[in-house]
Image (spheres, rainbow, N blue to C red):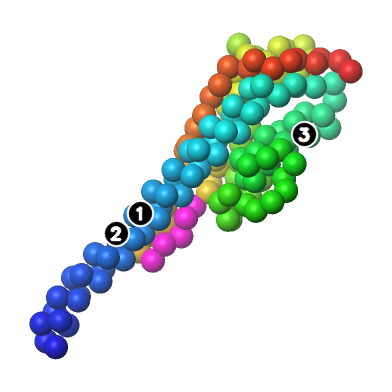
């Protein structure tokens, strides 16, 4: 009993730390996969930028692809706790300006913003990680 008590003071924190690191690594890997999928989807989706509502709808579809795995936003969350506000979607022209009816899109970036995974020992923060950037290959629709 005494030996177990002494050894458990080392083994239990080691097991908890290993579990926590493994879970954080799993979440990060899942976020990487979903970020790449959302950026890939955004790079192929037609970009209608005639008004701010159309741009917001385009970004919402990309965020839904990251959160749910589909642009409709239906089904189960891929990563529980990931909110729309924690996903940053940007579509830029070749000079780094926001793409609109005067600036043709050249690339798309998707990243997380202030997403954290709470744990027993520490909290893992994923700010601007993972990050995915793809060249824009879709159809640009500056007017309707």
Distance CA(mark 2)–CA(mark 1): 6 Å
* Residue topped by disc 2: 18
Task: Determine whether 10 is above or below 71 in the image.
Answer: below
| Label 2 SS | helix
Residue nearer the viewer, 73 or 105: 73
Q: Are marks 2 and 1 in contact (CB under 8 Å)?
A: yes
Question: Which quadrant of the figure has residue 119?
Answer: bottom left
Residue 85 in sight from this viewpoint: no
Give residue 69's position: percent from left, percent from top: 63, 42
Give residue 62's position: percent from left, percent from top: 67, 34
Task: Determine whether 95 is above or below 14 in the image.
Answer: above
Disc number lying in front (2 or 3):
2
Between disc 3 and disc 1, whose residue precedes? 1
Question: Farthest residue toward the right?
Answer: 144
Q: Residue at x 61, y 11 (%)?
A: 94
* Image disc number at residue 56: 3
* Residue topped by disc 1: 22
Question: Farthest residue toward the bottom?
Answer: 1
* Image disc number at residue 85: none
User: In the rendered structure, does residue 38 fall within the stretch colored magenta?
Assistant: no
Which stretch did the figure color magenta?
A: 116-120
Quarter of the figure that contains the N terminus: bottom left
Q: Residue at x 64, y 15 (%)?
A: 137
Label 3, residues with CA under 10 Å away: few <14, some 14-19, many ≥20: few
Q: Is residue 73 left or right of residue 128?
A: right
User: In the rendered structure, does residue 118 fall within the stretch colored magenta?
Assistant: yes
Distance CA(mark 2)–CA(mark 3): 41 Å
Main secondary structure along the magenta-highlighted residues: loop
Give residue 75's position: percent from left, percent from top: 69, 51
Q: Are marks 3 and 1 in contact (CB under 8 Å)?
A: no
Residue nearer the viewer, 39 or 90: 39
Task: Determine whether 26 is above or below 12 in the image.
Answer: above
């Amino acid at each position: 009993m005494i030996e177990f008590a002494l050894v458990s003071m080392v083994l239990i924190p080691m097991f908890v730390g290993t579990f926590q690191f493994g879970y954080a690594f799993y979440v990060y890997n899942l976020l990487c996969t979903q970020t790449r999928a959302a950026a890939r989807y955004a790079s192929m989706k037609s970009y209608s930028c005639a008004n701010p509502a159309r741009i917001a709808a385009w970004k919402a579809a990309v965020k839904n692809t990251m959160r749910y795995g589909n642009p409709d936003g239906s089904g189960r969350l891929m990563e529980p706790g990931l909110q729309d506000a924690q996903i940053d979607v940007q579509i830029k022209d070749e000079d780094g300006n926001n793409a609109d009816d005067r600036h043709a899109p050249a690339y798309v970036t998707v990243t997380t913003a202030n997403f954290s995974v709470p744990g027993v020992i520490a909290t893992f923060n994923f700010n601007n990680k993972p990050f995915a950037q793809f060249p824009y290959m879709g159809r640009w629709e500056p007017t309707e």
